[in-house]
Image (cartoon, grey):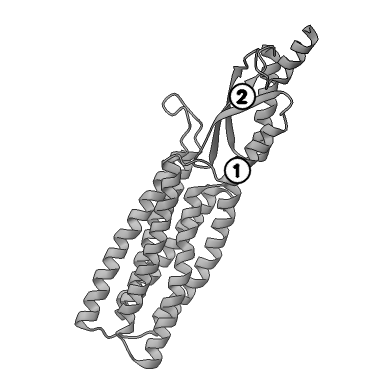
Amino acid sequence: MFKTSTGAAGLSIISNSVLVVLKLGVGLAIGSVSVISEALHSGTDLLASFIAFFSLRIAVRPADESHPFGHGKAEGISGFVEALLILVGVAFIVYEAVNRIMKGTVLISTYPGIAVMGVSFVANILVSRHLLKVARREDSLALEADARHLTADVYTSLGVFVGLIVVQVTGIHILDPIIALAVAVMITRTAFKLVGKSFVDLMDVRLPEEELDIIRRAIARYKDDIVEFHELRTRKSGRERQVDLHLLLCKTMSVGESHNLTEKLEDEIKSRLPKCVVNIHVEPCNLASVTCPRCQGKAATHE
């Protein structure tokens, strides 16, 4: 049930919903801004999970008349929106923590907070690992973003957990809002990383160099039939890779031969790069070209 990308996103929604209720209830009950900040953190993750869930449903839709290149950009947009939501949550945490530091704070009890943060720590480890595994298998930016949020929650939950234990042992209650500020810093780092990754998708940045090398090696397999290639353009839209290139073929090659060659090359690239759309434009060589083996062969025959 939770093995597909949308199923994994649904698992994240369920997990975050439970954690938000637990953290917020305990945080308000004991007056802990660090636990409340974690509740807000999980709240932004919950919103992010909803965004990921619906963006995944949109992103997998096939291309149509209005969206000829598909709907993959929905994942990049969702990642950017999630980052903005995180930063809004950070602003609230910082405001509340600074206010508590200025005015002073006393926790009613630390034990409920310690318990709920321990539960959060374990739950986030299990769910984030599952989400990241599915995200890598499905090559989903939206699901990976959700997994990264929960991974950040693992560390912040552990930090608050340890911090509350220190407060319990030392009785220094001012540590609670200070811990909340540390949580805010970690959350901010996650947000900026997510913005950077979303921009890569939205701004049509080319594929990584290792993937470009895969394409070049695939072309090299047909070097005896291809004079040269140029205008190699690549990008990624959601989980779909898009590759455009121009092939320079011998002018004497028939339409049928050139078609068969491009079909083989497309299949070669697709077998090496998953979820890939390849568009190849064929151009004829100049008959006088010394770089075209077929033309050279014909010229030698005529001599």
* Residue 20 at x, y percent in the picture: 39, 65
The residue indicated by pointer 1 is 211
83 to 220, vertically: above or below: below
The kind of secondary structure element at disc 2 is strand
Where, by quadrant of the figure, is residue 166 drawn? bottom left
* Residue 112 at x, y percent in the picture: 40, 81
Say whether residue 287 is left or right of residue 35.
right
Q: Which residue does the image show at 57% across and 48% down from the upper left?
A: 4
Q: Which residue does the image show at 71% across and 29% down from the upper left?
A: 223
Task: Give the amino acid at mark 2.
Answer: Leu
Residue that sits furthest to the bottom in the current view: 170
Can I make out residue 54 in this image? no
* Residue 171 at x, y percent in the picture: 34, 92
The residue indicated by pointer 2 is 247
- Rounded to the nearest whole Å, what is the CA distance between mark 1 and mark 2? 19 Å
58 to 49, vertically: above or below: above
Instruction: Please tell me whether mark 1 or mark 2 is closer to you in this view.
Output: 2
Circle 2 residues within 10 Å: few <14, some 14–19, many ≥20: many
